[in-house]
């Protein structure tokens, strides 16, 4: 398969890791998806469980490297097959130990990495998932679908596991188009209001296009009064 130029340029820019003990892209620094890589490194040090991603992109380079570093399984889902096929031409962008499955295949996954091309609703119905420590949602930017993805992931997440929500803090009203941030911010506002189940913190910058990334910790249901 011929190497995909755009995927190669993206990978070469991101995957120049600056420090062996601190997960950091020497070129990307805190920009674009750098925050996800650094926080993901902390989370996987502290939390048992695997990795799940809705929407393949630059984030996948960080998550793939993290899955290798911590020897975790990783699940990717994207509606567009090309978003999977093109990165597969670049070693290291996605895991080499993978099963690529479309919504029309009947293949049963067995590799450490699952790459699914199809709607995320079918993704969650079709496969059995191991407990998740780190999840990233950057698929459909409409509130309704982002909410579905969040609540499909939530039961899979281990106590004190984390879900990251991208496009959650539009810098201006101009970004509310579905081709930019869409209405993901509404989901962020709802989750922030639910302090019983979640701890939420939003980083307004340090992500692709500076459109915000929200970190959501799943609180254990059974917890001591001093952890309330």
Image (tube, grey):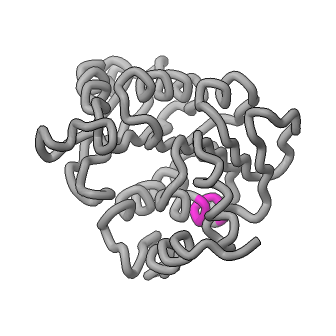
* Residue range highlighted in magenta: 64-68
Does the magenta segment cover residue 65?
Answer: yes
Does the magenta segment cover residue 7?
Answer: no
Residue 48 shows in the view: no
Residue 109 quadrant: top right
Q: Position of residue 163 (x, y in %)?
A: 45, 38
Q: Is residue 56 left or right of residue 182?
A: right
Query: Which residue lies most toward the left here?
Result: 172
- Residue beneath the point at 29% across and 44% down: 180
Q: Quick one: quadrant of the N terminus?
A: bottom right
Say how many tags the image has. Answer: 0
In this view, the residue in front, 64 or 108, is 108
Q: In this view, does 207 lie to the left or right of 9?
A: left
Q: Where is residue 93 in the image (x, y as percent from the top left)?
A: 61, 67
Q: Position of residue 28 (x, y in %)?
A: 36, 73
Report the predominant secondary structure element of the magenta stretch: helix
In this view, the residue in front, 113 or 57, is 57
Residue 190 quadrant: top left
Relative height, residue 79 to residue 227 (above, below): below
- Residue beneath the point at 51% across and 63% down: 62
Q: Where is residue 200 in the image (x, y as percent from the top left)?
A: 30, 34
Residue 144 shows in the view: yes
- Residue beneath the point at 78% across and 55% down: 98
Relative height, residue 51 to residue 188 (above, below): below
Q: Quick one: quadrant of the C terminus?
A: top left
Relative height, residue 25 to residue 221 (above, below): below
- Residue beneath the point at 47% across and 55% down: 40
Relative height, residue 79 to residue 45 (above, below): above
Q: In this view, does 170 lie to the left or right of 93?
A: left
């Amino acid at each position: 398969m011929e190497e995909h130029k755009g995927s190669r340029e993206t990978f070469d820019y991101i995957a120049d890791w600056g420090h062996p003990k601190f997960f950091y892209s020497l070129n990307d620094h805190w920009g674009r998806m750098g925050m996800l890589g650094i926080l993901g490194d902390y989370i996987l040090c502290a939390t048992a469980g695997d990795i799940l991603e809705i929407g393949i992109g630059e984030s996948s380079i960080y998550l793939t490297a993290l899955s290798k570093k911590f020897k975790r399984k990783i699940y990717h889902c994207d509606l567009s097959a090309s978003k999977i096929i093109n990165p597969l031409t670049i070693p290291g962008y996605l895991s080499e130990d993978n099963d690529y499955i479309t919504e029309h295949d009947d293949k049963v996954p067995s590799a450490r990495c699952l790459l699914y091309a199809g709607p995320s609703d079918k993704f969650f119905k079709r496969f059995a998932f191991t407990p998740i420590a780190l999840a990233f949602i950057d698929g459909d930017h409409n509130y309704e679908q982002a909410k579905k993805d969040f609540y499909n992931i939530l039961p899979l997440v281990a106590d004190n596991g984390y879900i990251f929500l991208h496009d959650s803090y539009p810098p201006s009203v101009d970004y509310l188009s579905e081709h930019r941030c869409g209405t993901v911010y509404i989901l962020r506002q709802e989750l922030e209001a639910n302090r019983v189940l979640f701890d939420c913190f939003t980083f307004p910058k340090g992500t692709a296009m500076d459109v915000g990334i929200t970190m959501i910790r799943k609180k254990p249901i059974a917890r001591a009064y001093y952890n309330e």
